[in-house]
Amino acid sequence: MTWELTGVVYLAVMAGLLLGGVWIAIALGAVGVVGLLFVNPALLAGIESVAWNTIDSFILTAVPLFLFMGSLIMNSGISARFYRGLAPWLSHVPGGLAQSNLVACSIFAALCGSSVATAAAIGAIAVPEMRARGYDMRITTGTLAAGGTLGILIPPSIPFIIYASAVGESVGRLFAAGIVPGLLLTIAFMVFLGIQVRLRPGLVPAARETVTWAARLRGLADVVPVVALIVLVLGGIYAGVMTPTEAAGVGAAGAVAVAAVYRRLTWAALRRSFLETIRTNAMILFIVIGAQIMSFALVSAGIPRGAVEAISGLSPSPWVIFAALVAMYLVLGCMVDALSLMLLTLPVVFPIVQAQGFDPIWFGVVLVLLLEAGLITPPVGMNLFVIQGLSNESLGTVATGSMPYVALMILLVILLAVFPSVALWLPARMY
Amino acid sequence: MVSVVLNRAAAAVAAAALAALILLIVLQVVGRRVLGAPIVYTDEVSGYLLVVLTFLGLGYAMQHGDHIRVEILTRRLGGPALRAFRVAWCLIGLAFTGLLAVRTAALALDSSRLSAFSIVAQIPLAPIQAVAPAGFLLLFLQLLVQLVEAVRSRP
């Protein structure tokens, strides 16, 4: 059977299982099993090694460690303290607390590798405070949903870890490559918000609160320990003192220490953080197992090689391929969650990207940015759901508030395409 | 419910593995960077701890509804159609996890027969590899429970 025909069978089974609502991990794995039966049933004897080798991994060990770090920072109430400590410093910037949302999200993103967790952690504190002060709910929910997406661009980032382990790149370099684009995107969000509230002042409460320097300095006490933890983890990786997995372990222990310093290290917070981590980690790594089985089947059927050869036969400009990939991710991102979409597409997309001569680190950053856009585009945007659930507003309100930020993400993708060094400059200067 | 009790116990073991992992890595960093005496088997043992905490969490996560699905087309379903879909999801899940449980058990049995040991720490491989089928079995049990619930649900 030709690879094209096998490819069509895979696509049909996959679309049927995924859209039919089968758990994503099981859908991907089942596509792989069906595919292997199709190609050569004897290959089924390989799936146990795939499952085992996927999880017996030092690199992926960073996943539960970073999950735990973010979870404990939230459950011990440290994220609430640093949000309140941060707010007095941004009270004079046009946008007020909405600006605090963006900055707090970018800081929490540096403590946690997940966008959903970032939006949930900051949203839980910000929504009631901003509603009480009379902020427009589109501004409140939009900044939280969009700001939350920074979780996977600003390191640590679970998608970067999984991308690195799937394509054999350095996690540390990907983390470094995410820093400058992550900061640029935060600044772009803040500038946009500033202009928006200047043009339509009714969106934020008119009366600015007077903030004393004493209040600011008190707030600093709640921001500094968190920033110190970030410097320890990311600085350790960047300086080459620790591998990303080691930094994740130190960060997890550091979160326990910070919680203890604040006297917020309760048994309940610890227990909750441990169990949440076990659940989320199992969910994520089960999808990775399913995707690896699918990838094994795709490679056995020669589909990635066939696709690469077919495309190079057409010899289009690499930028046509790039534009097609961007369009594909923006469309699929509306339907499938970020991590699953990445794992679902990489076995075929990555060989194509490589054959076109794109830098794999640069592509990782572009891919994560496109996945971020998918998190806030309806009908399926995980961050929209999280903020909708926290705020009890309609999905329409959250989505309208978030829409402008999608445009900013696409602008950053274009900027990265024109100036790849925006992403690649920092990792090139690592140890 | 047997499945609930078993999965809770498995989650407790998984949480202990996570705590051990954090401790091991901190000791490794201190040993390597401060004392200049690296713990040579950290990489290997970390991988095994990840195996324990991941596979033993599979059923627990299913019990809490954490395994994500694409709900864009199925969320509006109700009545008999929803019941049919729930039954189908469970059957597909049972077939897949059952297959993985059997295949990963074969892997552990092979290691046991060959009395294979890990390279650095010389830990017998079979007991650690047996965690994978145990985890898939716990997930299988939980899916069985959900299948019974789906069949019994009133459309």
Image: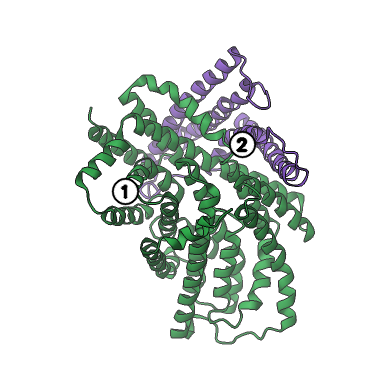
Chain colours: A green, B purple
Foreground of the two, A126 or B2? A126
The percent coordinates of residue A164 (x first, y second) are: 49, 45
- On screen, residue B76 versus residue B130, left or right, reads left
The percent coordinates of residue A372 (x first, y second) are: 44, 58
Q: What kind of element bears circle 1?
A: loop
* Observer able to see residue A402: yes
* Residue A107 versus residue B10 in the image, above or below: below
The residue at 45%/76% (across/down) is A192
Quadrant the N terminus of chain A occupies = top left
Report the Cα–Cα distance between label 2 and label 1.
35 Å
- Numbered disc in front, either 2 or 1: 1
Residues at discs 2 and 1 both on one chain? no
* Residue A124 versus residue A371 in the image, above or below: below
Foreground of the two, A332 or B37? B37
Judge the density around disc 1: few (<14), some (14-19), many (≥20) Cα neighbours within 10 Å.
Answer: some
Chain to which mark 2 belongs: B
The residue at 50%/58% (across/down) is A178
* Residue A405 versus residue B93 in the image, above or below: below
Chain to which mark 1 belongs: A
Q: What kind of element bears circle 2?
A: helix
The disc at residue B50 is 2
The disc at residue A240 is none
Foreground of the two, A330 or B99? A330
* Residue A242 versus residue A306 in the image, above or below: below
Q: Residue furthest top?
A: B113
Give the amino acid at mark 2. Answer: Leu
Which residue matches tag 1? A356
Q: Residue furthest left?
A: A314
Give the amino acid at mark 1. Answer: Gln
The percent coordinates of residue A66 (x first, y second) are: 61, 49
The percent coordinates of residue A368 (x first, y second) are: 45, 55
